[in-house]
Amino acid sequence: MAILATVAVLTVALAATVRAADDSNGNPVQAQIDHGKSTYAERCSHCHGPNMMNSGTITPDLRTFPDDKTRFITTVKNGKNNRMPPWGDILSEDEIGNLWAFISSRRKP
């Protein structure tokens, strides 16, 4: 019985660690940023450029994207102006949140 209780406690602790979205100050944790960077490289960099800007295209410089998480998530999920495809059926909620963590971590002041 003690082993079962220990396994349950460890499982809950591990799940809390993996799902932790923010640190104690409400900032994204480094793991989210790293996962977002990977997703960005795989899914977004083709259009938005490897450094979040792609000169000579219609894509915006994502380093200057406003500090508006809701707008970002809506744009990613639904697409934009028939130029950016919707990713809501392709990316998970966690992947989109990680993208936001990465992009907001690279925002120009």
Image (cartoon, rainbow, N blue to C red):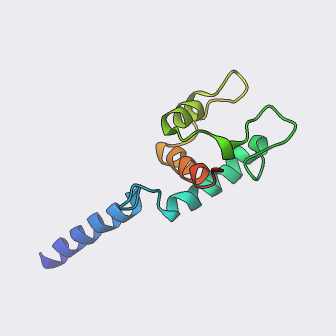
Above/below status of 21 relative to 10: above
Q: Residue at x 77, y 45 (%)?
A: 53
Pick the front one: 22 or 44? 22
Quarter that holds the N terminus: bottom left
Residue 75, quarter of the rendered image? top right
Residue 60 appears in the figure? yes
User: Is residue 87 left or right of 15 when viewed as pictured?
Assistant: right
Q: Residue at x 47, y 42 (%)?
A: 93
Above/below status of 71 relative to 34: above
What percent of the width, then of the height, locates residue 54?
81, 43
Q: Residue at x 51, y 63 (%)?
A: 31
User: Is residue 88 left or right of 4 when viewed as pictured?
Assistant: right
Above/below status of 79 relative to 28: above
What percent of the width, then of the height, locates residue 90?
58, 38
What percent of the width, then of the height, locates residue 26?
39, 55
View extreme (top): residue: 81
Q: Residue at x 61, y 49 (%)?
A: 103
View extreme (right): residue: 56
Pick the front one: 109 or 87? 109
Residue 88 appears in the figure? no
Residue 59, quarter of the rendered image? top right
User: Is residue 40 left or right of 53 when viewed as pictured?
Assistant: left
What percent of the width, then of the height, locates residue 84?
70, 30
View extreme (front): residue: 109
